[in-house]
Image (spheres, helix red, strand yellow):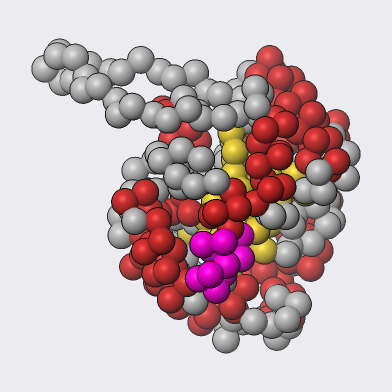
Amino acid sequence: MQNRRDFLRNSGALALGGLMLPNLADAFFDNKKTANFGVQLFTTMSVIDKDVEGTLKQISTIGYKEIESAFSMKGGYYGMKPKEFAKLVIDLGMSWQAHHVNGAPFNRPAPRPTADGSAAPARPAMPPMKSLLNDTQQIVDEAAEGGVKYLVCASTPVKTMEEIKLSLEILQKAGEAAKKAGLTFVFHNHTAEFEQVEGQRPFDMMTSQISADILKFELDLAWATKAGVDIPALFKKHPGRFPLFHVKDLNKETQRPVEVGTGYIDFNPIFAAAKTAGVKHYFVEQDGAPSPVENLTTSFNNLKKIMG
């Protein structure tokens, strides 16, 4: 099982937590409708390219109303042009709100030999993967053409100070281009952004060196929790800077993503602070979901229970 960062690197590229707080529904959704839950399509990576329309139709049938797209083995937008994909989503009664792209490419590690010493099997051929390092304007133009509101940097290397400095330059440039095109540019975290590099956290460098009108954040609730972040305190420190959430849960023992409501993440205090965060859209994501449609159904039903 692999998370987004692992996938990009290798490819080159509740318990329910007790009763609801009295005002949680008001804080969670301005219009108080669970219909605003969305799906990050990386959850469906194992199945969507085999039947794009069928997979999206199943997602819509569950009750999800918003889509956040990601990388596809078919290339482009699940084998389509931006307007074509947007029309398909709309025809199925949903809206395409955001799109994920890579920041700077990760170095692709050499294949490890097998246990018996023989060569590792060849990796599947990958379609070209655009990155904000090399293809900023094309990525921005295509997102604008598709009508999405948010362009999201899914991941970028931040393990060394050299990587961080390059990534900051990329994020600044991409944010400026996105703003000019009428898009909101957003960064999606993993755990690495909250780990110290030469005495500094990459996330803090992003917030201090790039202005809020250029860069906002999609907080992955699971990875931030795993990194030991006090999420409500983070919202208080940077109010209004988190228009997007990845609603994700983790198994306590394995620390791997599971259906929302079946792991250890306590969503109640996070959702209660959503107004301070400035959140507008909630995308359910389960990296490496073994049965994506079934898993997304469980997450949706548990979120409805959370909402009361």
The x, y position of residue 282, in whole percent, is 62, 64
The quadrant in which residue 135 appears is top right
- Magenta stretch encompasses residue 8: no
State which quadrant residue 10 falls in: top left
Residue 246, placed above or below residue 203: below
Magenta residue span? 87-96
Which quadrant of the rendered structure holds the N terminus?
top left
Residue located 74% across and 20% down the image: 165
Residue 169 x %, y %? 77, 23
Residue 77 drawn at (x, y percent): 51, 46
Between 119 and 174, the one nearer to me in the picture: 174
Using the rendered image of the protein, determine whether residue 297 is visible from the camera's viewpoint: yes
Picture quarter with the C terminus: bottom right
Residue at the farthest left position: 116
Residue 259's image quarter? bottom left
Q: Is residue 201 visible?
A: no
Residue situated in front as seen by the camera: 241 or 48: 48
In the image, what residue occupies the spot 65% across and 42% down? 142
142 relative to 242 in the view: left or right: left
